[in-house]
Image: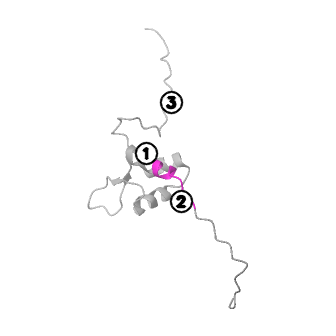
Amino acid sequence: MTNEATPAQPDKDPYDAHEGDSKRVYTPPTLARKWGCSAESVISLIKAGRLLAFSVSPASCRRPRWRISPEAVRLYELAKQEPAVVKAPRRRKDPNVIQFFK
């Protein structure tokens, strides 16, 4: 019997979801750690419909246990990357117009 040490495997990133890994799902606390926010913020995104999720709790249970697929996370992150709408610049007042009422 030899006392060979098994090579240490590199720690996997718990947030890393590989393509084709359809069984990997996220919970609100894990996404909150990944995004640096609270679990309540993730749940509010789910309730607002901005982040797609499904509940694994039984139908008789009133409290949902949310799970988020990697595809839903990817879609949400892509939507967040879209540039915001730029407002048109304000029109300047014409100095030749006399305002009778202010």
- Where's the C terminus, which quadrant? bottom right
Near mark 2 (Cα within 10 A), the count class, few <14, some 14-19 or many ≥20, is: few
Q: Nearer the viewer, mark 3 or mark 1?
A: 1
- Which of the numbered marks, if any, corresponds to residue 74? 1
- Where's the N terminus, which quadrant? top left
Secondary structure, mark 2, is: loop
Amino acid residing under circle 1: Arg
Amino acid residing under circle 3: Asp
The image position of residue 67, as x and y in percent, is 37, 50
Q: Which residue is mark 2?
A: 85
Among the two numbered marks 2 and 3 on one chain, the one whose residue lies closer to the N terminus:
3
Secondary structure, mark 3, is: loop
Q: How many marks?
A: 3
Residue at the spot 45% in from the left edge and 61% down from the top edge: 44
Q: 60 or 71, which is in the foreground?
A: 71
Q: Which residue is mark 3?
A: 11
The image position of residue 59, as x and y in percent, is 26, 60
Boundaries of the magenta span:
77-86
Q: Residue furthest left?
A: 59
The image position of residue 53, as x and y in percent, is 36, 53
Q: Height in image: 36 above or below 98?
A: above
The image position of residue 48, as x and y in percent, is 42, 63
Near mark 1 (Cα within 10 A), the count class, few <14, some 14-19 or many ≥20, is: few
Among the two numbered marks 3 and 1 on one chain, the one whose residue lies closer to the N terminus:
3
Residue at the spot 53% in from the left edge and 48% down from the top edge: 35
Q: Residue furthest right?
A: 95
